[in-house]
Amino acid sequence: MTRFNAWNVIKNGLNGQSGWSRQWRDPEPKSNYDVIIVGGGLHGLATAFYLAKNHNIKNVAVLEKGWIGGGNAGRNTTIVRSNYMMPGNHEFYEHSLKLWENLSHELNYNVMFSQRAHVSLFHSPGARDSAARRYNVMRLHGTDAELWDIKTLKKKIPHLNYDDSRFPILGAAVQRRAGNARHDAVAWGYARAADSLGVDILQNCEVTGITRKNGSIESIQTSRGTIKGKKVGFAVAGNTSVLWQMAELGNLPIESHKLQAFVTESIKPLLDQVVVYGVGGAHFYISQSDKGSMVFGGDLDWYKSYAQRGNLPIVQDSAEAAMAILPCLGRIRLLRHWAGVMDMTMDGSFFICKTPISNLYLNAGWNYGGFKASPASGWYFADLIANENPHNYVHNHNLERFEKGINIDERGAGPDPKLHG
Amino acid sequence: MIRINCPYCGERDHSEFSYGGDASIKYPSLEASEKEWTEAIFFRKNIRGFQIETWHHSNGCRMWLEVERSTVTHEIKSVRPCHPDLQKVVENNK
């Protein structure tokens, strides 16, 4: 694989771009691997990369039923932040953000990470106090966080709707190091970097059956033949329950819900930050892509579903929220909207844990937060698979936490998955 | 848009309703073990295909309904009241 550097860019600029090689191979499945990762999304690819990079485990296969970047990797609004408060979560997401900051160099692939600031508006004194509490916790743990008063906010983003008498803007909680990245580039970057370390990325390879023997997984049947692995990791958020039941493991604290995202036509630079607006039960976040499109999203579709398409009432809700906070968008046209299937969990937090099967490891339950978590998710899942011992940051992110009463409920919404948006 | 045929009001858009969740859950007795209660409150089958679920006609007759719906195609097979006595009344009036 040709590395990206200034010398190669100049050289290939002069020879008609003929010197570049394939980004990753398309190998035939081997019959045996040290580790099989089911799911070639961002988390699966990142896990394979860190297994090879951090733990020198290179005989690894990533099984993907479709193509790389075709699932939730390409169905998100690309927001990266680390404004979490619960023990375990804030350390985890902060480490993820630190990995993002160096990811393009680490992967030798430009993931277009842009730390443009995440601006979360508040509209009442109570919301301001709550934001201040959360952001003070972040500062105590060494994460950057600040509150912007209305004067600062008006200077930074002059075209928000400051005249709304129902939900007046009082200020914003801001994380400056947060921002966006190019989602496809992250998938391709991890795939390319993992492949160059020897990982086999097997696309169009759907798992159709799981054979268990003496309490462990013996082999996995796929649409490209039977594959054996000493260890198996599931990283298939959205469809975790389906695979879990294929392994005859019963129920999970997960429901699959769908979340929509929207892209408009391209316009000149309008919004330099990620803006979040959440009032009266609504939930809305918007940023502008490097191509100029406004990228935004809102609430879940509110009913359980595995369909990768969204419903119309949420299109209307999101459009109303867009008009409420940025009325200047009134005449912009929507180009595309789509839905991704989320693992919504009973407390809104994820799972990186061991399972009742001795050689099976679970990475699941990413709710709204899968994209930003990708680097740390891969890092700690690889660590768990290699070392068998969950790291301190994730040692409570297991399936037993509900029975023990140590739920990691960032939102305090209780055991109803659709409320953890 | 999913259209739900409410046995009291007729066919309406799903935006008139609120989604409840899995209607197959049976709570154990108060004396049951913590394991059983954890299973009932936190663990779900999360069916990919037809499942029985509850919907509340919150912007209509405000009755709770049991809906048999596919979680893949959103096709609805049947709708009936949640309460078994009301189910009988609706059946008899058909």
Image (cartoon, rainbow, N blue to C red):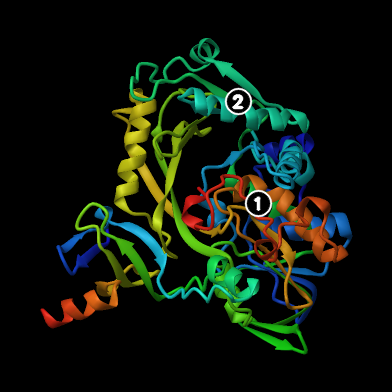
On the picture, is A340 further left or further right than B9?
right
Chain letter of disc 2?
A: A
User: In the rendering, at what x and y percent does residue A2 appear?
Assistant: 76, 49
Residue type at mark 1 is Ile
In the rendered image, the vertical position of residue A323 relative to residue A315, given as above or below: above
Q: Local crowd at mark 1 within 10 Å, few (<14), some, or many (≥20)?
A: many
Q: Which residue is mark 2?
A: A174
Q: Secondary structure at mark 1?
A: loop
Q: Looking at the image, which is closer to me, A63 or A370?
A: A370
Of the numbered discs in the image, which one, if any, rests on residue A408?
1
Q: Secondary structure at mark 2?
A: strand
Task: Specify the farthest residue to the front.
Answer: B31
Q: Residue at x 64, y 29 (%)?
A: A133
* Residue A63 visible within the image: yes
* Residue A24 visible within the image: no
User: In the rendering, at what x and y percent does residue B53 appear?
Assistant: 37, 69
On the picture, is A232 further left or further right than B79?
right
Residue type at mark 2 is Val
